[in-house]
Amino acid sequence: MTSTDTVLSLEGITKRFGKLTANDHLDLSLRRGEILALLGENGAGKTTLMNILFGHYVQDEGVVRVNGEMLPPGSPGAALKAGIGMVHQHFALAENLSGLDNIRLGTEGLFALGGKAAARKKVEQIIAESGLEVDLDRKVASLTVGEKQRVEILKALYRNVRVLILDEPTAVLTPQEAEGLFTVLRRLAANGLGVIFISHKLGEVLSVSTRILVLRGGRKAGELVTADADRRAIADLMVGKAVAEVKRTAATPAETLLEFSDVHLRRGSTRESLRNVGFALRAGEIVGLAGVSGNGQGGIAALISGLAVPDQGAVLLYGEPITRADPRALVAAGVARMPEDRQHDGVVGTMSVADNIAIEEVRSGAFSRMGLLDRKAMQARATSAIAAYDIRCPGPDAEARLLSGGNVQKLILARVLEREPRVILANQPTRGLDVGAQSEVHRRIIAARDRGAAVLVISEDLDELFALADRFLVVHAGEVSDAGPSDRLDRGAVGLLMAGQAA
Amino acid sequence: MDVLLDIFGSANFWAAAIRIATPLIFGVLGALICERAGVLNLGIEGIFVAGAMAGWLAVYLGAGLWGGVLVALATGATFGLLHAVLAVILGLSQHVSGIGITLLATSLSYFTYRTALPTVTSPPRIVPFQPVSIPGLSDLPFFGPALFQQTPLTFLALAFVALVAFVLYRTPLGLAIRAVGDNPASVEAQGLSVRGLRIGAVVAGSALMALGGAFLTMSAFDAFFFGMVNGRGWICIALVVFASWQPGKALLGALLFGAFDAFQIRLQAEIGQVVPGQVFLMLPYLLSIVALVLVARRADYPRALLQPWFKGQRH
């Protein structure tokens, strides 16, 4: 591909992190006016490749060429100068500065004076041309996520980039904001910009891209023109095998394991209040809790996790009321918790995979001898868990913060499911995960149910709830209503309950 | 009540407050620059001592007063560079590195002093900076003696407040310093050097801190004593928080502390027979703590303070 239109080419890029090869001899080329979607599961190497392209990482092998010129590795400054702009998944914005100051940052001589007015004029012109509306004088800290992203794109455009890379730009956007972003991207591409769009969401990739490159395990799995692409085929390319449809047989609910009885809970700093909440979780049944976030899910999760006790009423575990907020006692009694914010509340980032898998059980004797940690046992458990749950990481000693979201969730599954818990709280179990990881998590949850566990799945994703839940609860404004068996429900009915109207 | 009126009504009191505040202004500005870039510099106490000693010694050996100022600046910059190597380049704990610098700089200063002057028993003296008169202003009634009869270093400190504020808020350099203390990724993504900015800020900030020490030996007194810095560096660390990392408020904080201190000296003279002297010595520190509690709970820390930055690391 040596067409004169080629603005960017990556040749034979290889990058290793310890034993993990994140990119294995990857090639990629990009033409003007093209929107190339870089698609792949979590950990397929998409973000690593883009970080090499932008100079955040230094590749072990291979070269990056912009307009035929070789780009010196490891220098974001050189990448910027060559006309490459990147919008990071985690925004690279100084929140204490205004949008305009973030855009100007690094574009003027350090002692130059009076550049602000000229900068404002240029940015305003770009805003007018691109439609990226944003209040330039507000501090970034006070902007919405969508606005911050627009500032990021403006930062790149302000530097007259010829290639714009967006790393999972829609992960943080509402559907409306995402649609707005696509409109902008199409307009920019029409003006000759080359766009690389990283995603693992098939739908949006098909709607916005002109060409698709699929990565798997650090290698190129396939490349196709979007117009000829077929959803199913891409999904299979991403996962490397046909994605198994998760099958759920009819539930056979047995005795009640966990019961909320007329529970009231006052508002806390991170949760809304609960009023008059009553429901039961029975062995061998998955109950889905639907609701717009912030309607009381946090309180219910806190009560089941042992982080709170009701102000009135009772939460009964195996018929006994829980009287103390004592997470350890609950875990010992057989309650498994998959927290909503898995990176923050689910793992200790600076501790190893082995430590994180053992962390809930260090007192139980499984991983300790005479009060001292049994490193061997922890290591052995971690090694088997990594294999059994397909946790992609350099090894048991790798720090948990180095794992992608999907692999953190698999780590948590390995931690909580191995004990064969009787009650499982799965809070947003697949938020942000790709298709492959998603079906794996679903399969594990259903298997736990079939073994006789009582499961509560809290999710904002109705598709997920319909795939998993045998029965629906809907929470609205701190009150929970029983929506009945899932096979007698449809999305519309649940939606009405979520909005607080009787179905 | 009359006692208080007497104290606050005297030009002498306000002149003393400003004089006492001067080393703190240098120190708090220096700490502010470091912290704005995301680096806590607990070497400040030792850098004060080193600046006090090195500046004084240079003058004593014949370098002249302004020569002494330059020597103090260079001394501070050197210790700053050491802190930058440890805390920025190697990414070591900023607390540990800073305290290490304080211990090292303090003992090295005492050692140098003793080595240079092995025989003296009473501290030798130099001719320190004298108050300068500013034509017109210094002759004003009350305000003249209160505000405008200070030594050149005090005026220099005030000029630095304006300069630091200007650089931070009006230049692209200041923009980059504020950004690197909030989110280093934002700076790197714009092609600037996180390390370069942080090293520069720590070196410059440390040089300013040393001037705070030099003021003590070259302006407030005329000799170097062991223990003369006496916690002023630590006060600056607290004042930065009090000032919410803003130069203007830093000046205010330093002046407030100076006023407390000047006030306790005078109060001691008035009612010293009734209340033990130690209570008065404690007063400015106690009031600093109260002020800190009131202000700092809402403090808006630079988000990247204490966080080392390694290129190519996942974050």
Image (cartoon, rainbow, N blue to C red):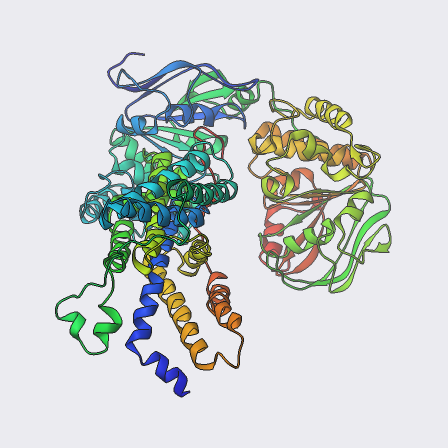
Q: Quadrant of the C terminus of chain A?
A: bottom right
Answer with left or right where residue A343 lies relative to residue A218. Answer: right
Q: Residue shown at 43%/18% (left/top)?
A: A59
The answer to whether residue A209 is seen in the rendering is yes
* Tally of numbered tags: 0
Q: Whole-percent x and y of residue A166?
A: 39, 33
Name the one closer to the observer, A433 or A223.
A433
Answer with left or right where residue A491 lies relative to residue A154. Answer: right
Name the one closer to the observer, A39 or A110.
A110
Residue A192 in which image quadrant: top left
Q: Whole-percent x and y of residue A147?
A: 38, 47
Q: Residue furthest bottom?
A: B2
Residue B81 in which image quadrant: top left
Up-down relation of residue A501 to residue A128 (above or below): below
Up-down relation of residue A497 to residue A453 (above or below): below
Q: Whole-percent x and y of residue A91?
A: 42, 40
Name the one closer to the observer, A13 or A259.
A13
The answer to whether residue B290 is seen in the rendering is no
Up-down relation of residue A125 to residue A159 (above or below): below
Answer with left or right where residue B294 lies relative to residue A105. Answer: right
Q: Quadrant of the N terminus of chain A?
A: top left
Q: Whole-percent x and y of residue A400?
A: 61, 32
